[in-house]
Amino acid sequence: MNMNLYGHDGQWLMVDCGVSFDEPLTPEYKDKSDGQRFDVVAPDPTFIASQKENLCGMVITHAHEDHVGAVPYLWQRLRCPIYTTPFTAEVLRRKLSETGLAGKVPIIEVDEASFCQVGPFQLEWLAVTHSIPEPYAIKITTALGTILHTADWKIDAQPITGKPFDAAMYRALGQTNILAMVGDSTNALKPGFSISERNCYDGLLATIRPLNGRVVVGCFGSNVARLISLARVAKKTGRYMALYGRSLINMYSIARKLNHWPDDLTLIDPAHVGYLPPQEVLAVATGSQGERRAALSRMARDEHHQLSLDKGDTVIFSSIVIPGNENSVEALIRQLQGLGVDTIHSENSTLPIHASGHPAAEELTLMYNWVRPQIAIPVHGEPEHLSAHAQIAKTAGVRKRYVGLNGDLYQLAPISGIRRQVIKTGRIPVRA
Ligand SMILES: [Zn+2]
Ligand SMILES: [Zn+2]
């Protein structure tokens, strides 16, 4: 989960405000929670909430839960305007209406052409490619210099939704003396390049084309590009596609509303799928991590009221196993196989049926060669990812790399350095 604060001249700017789905709570909250399990946790905002008059705004880079998910729970304590793009704003508005904050939060919609001055921070929105519509890096300029906050990104020349990655724009940044680049370390340990969404489409088409029974694909609800690819595969293979799971249906409806969904791709009502011959079914379902209440698990237990699977059907996991979920995914696969259903997981498929949205080592190297910041600050990863990212920056010739932990203060100008554990951080429960 992400919550970054940039400070200048007595004012603060927050970049992203996300949740996480595991439960290592700060001990003081653990006592209060009385043994109750919390599935959703957020960063403890006490430091900034106690001086919210100095928080001049919040920027949300994209609509993933680890970047936007905590806003409905923490905004009451922060009460600042939020700057983001139309797709993310729509995702956020729907979340806010579920927590009684509809219409109460000032959301300022921006795009690449927008120039925002938020307190002492001048903001520019630079498009990247990632695994959700409208992902952005933020260029933050103050009187003392310019920072590139990349947020989550990869280099995708054929992203299915949105424009291809614009290398020229980042190359041009290299001429502008970027003080620091703060960015994604998720896949710093992976060599080479991430694969394109387009390759993933080809892999899914080749995987699904020879199958005869029903096909169910498990994927992350927010991956609109993957949904578009699957709808194209359905069209090409004579299948009808339907969505199972609230988050999938919600994302599809936002994508349609904001013109991210191609008009020629139609879906059918999930209630009608049961009447189709098996070879005409392509179901897309939530629950690729083995979540018990999600659609895939209910199908595996044969408890789904709209779709029942049989021998000869296939379940494809177009997703990774998020570390920590290995057992639940394995249990789900065993349950499906118990029904006689074939399973194909991206992690042991010979064809590419999942593409990561994060930069592998060679992409990080390219970005450093283009942007050429004075300082590299790896974030968004465990310590091993941050240090691998720093090593890549060093090899690419970045003079200073600061690797820290939550709560560290990175001083960038006029003299740079890192001050350890200046701010108390922690995890608070927000939803059971
Ligand atoms: Zn993301
Ligand atoms: Zn992220």
Image (tube, helix red, strand yellow):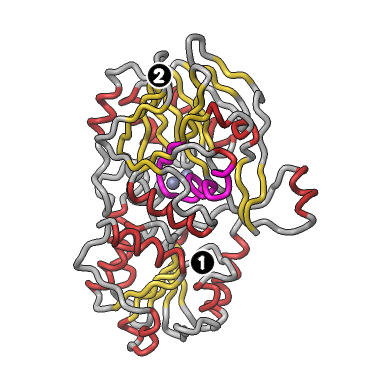
Question: Would you call the spot at circle 1 few (<14 residues within 10 Å), some (14-19), or many (20 or more)?
Answer: many
Q: Looking at the picture, which amino acid does disc 2 mark?
A: Thr
Q: Position of residue 175 (x, y in %)?
A: 27, 18
Residue at which label 1 appears: 287
Q: Looking at the picture, which amino acid does disc 1 mark?
A: Gly
The magenta stretch spans residue 66: yes
Disc 2 versus disc 1: nearer the observer: 2
* Quadrant of the image occupied by residue 344: bottom left
Q: Position of residue 415 (x, y in %)?
A: 51, 9
Residue at which label 2 appears: 142
Dividing the image into 4 quarters, which one contains the C terminus? Answer: bottom right
Q: Residue furthest top?
A: 415
Say if 228 sits above or below 15 in the image: below
Q: Looking at this view, is 214 or 152 the one in front?
A: 152
- Left or right of 104? Residue 158 is left
Ligand 2 is within 8 Å of the C-beta of the residue at disc 2 = no
**Dot 2: what SS?**
strand
Q: Which mark is residue 279?
A: none
Q: In whole angstroms, how far apart are the C-alphas of marks 2 and 1?
A: 43 Å
Q: Residue furthest front?
A: 104
Image: magenta residue range: 58-76
Say if 17 sits above or below 39 in the image: above
The residue drawn where x is 49% and y is 41% is 186
- Left or right of 123? Residue 335 is right
